[in-house]
Image: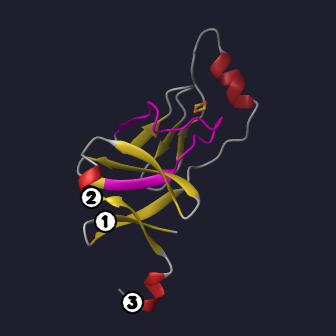
């Protein structure tokens, strides 16, 4: 590991603690993050939904490289955090769209991941 890397990569959790298809909310360096494994690839995002701060570890679905919050179905890409859909749910009565209008649309922060010494590491 180079000197430059030492200040930036942080151990998140041991590889054996995260199985494919699972995700965990953890604190790394006082930052609350979500670390998951989807189709045998690790990913890490900020832990709380950008819409109304629901913890994504509690019921969010990962599909097609996107993470979808269970509360109002806001969806972001896990590759770069780009917003795909902002609070579309429920469709009728249209609370979702209404709630969506009450908050500013934002991308999700994504953290780079790698494996070193059997640890999943994230890059801050
Ligand atoms: S809190 Fe996640 S979509 Fe509303």
In this view, the mark in front (3 or 1): 1
The reply to whether callout 2 and callout 1 are in contact (CB within 8 Å) is: yes
Mark 3 vs 1, N-terminal side: 3
Secondary structure of residue under mark 3: loop
Q: Which residue lies under the disc numbered 2?
A: 15
Q: Residues within 10 Å of mark 3 (few under 14, many from 20)?
A: few
Residue 4 vertical position relative to residue 113 in the rendered view, above or below? below
In this view, the mark in front (3 or 2): 2
Q: Nearer the viewer, residue 6 or 42?
A: 6
Q: Which residue lies under the disc numbered 3?
A: 2
Which residue is found at the position 57% from the left and 16% from the top?
90
Mark 2 vs 1, N-terminal side: 2
Residue 119 numbered tag? 1
Q: Position of residue 29 (x, y in %)?
A: 55, 65
Mark 3 vs 2, N-terminal side: 3
Residue 102 vertical position relative to residue 23 in the rendered view, above or below? above
In which quadrant of this rendering is ligand 1 seen? top right
Residue lying farthest to the right in this orientation: 102
């Amino acid at each position: 590991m180079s000197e430059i890397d030492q200040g930036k990569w942080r151990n998140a959790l041991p590889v054996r603690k995260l199985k494919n298809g699972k995700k965990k909310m953890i604190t790394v360096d006082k930052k609350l993050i979500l670390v998951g494994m989807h189709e045998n690839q690790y990913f890490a995002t900020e832990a709380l939904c950008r819409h109304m701060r629901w913890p994504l570890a509690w019921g969010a679905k990962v599909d097609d490289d996107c993470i979808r919050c269970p509360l109002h179905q806001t969806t972001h890409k896990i590759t770069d955090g780009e917003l795909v859909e902002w609070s579309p749910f429920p469709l009728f009565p249209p609370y979702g769209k209404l709630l969506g209008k009450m908050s500013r649309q934002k991308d999700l922060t994504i953290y780079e991941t790698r494996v070193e010494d059997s640890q999943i590491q994230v890059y801050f």
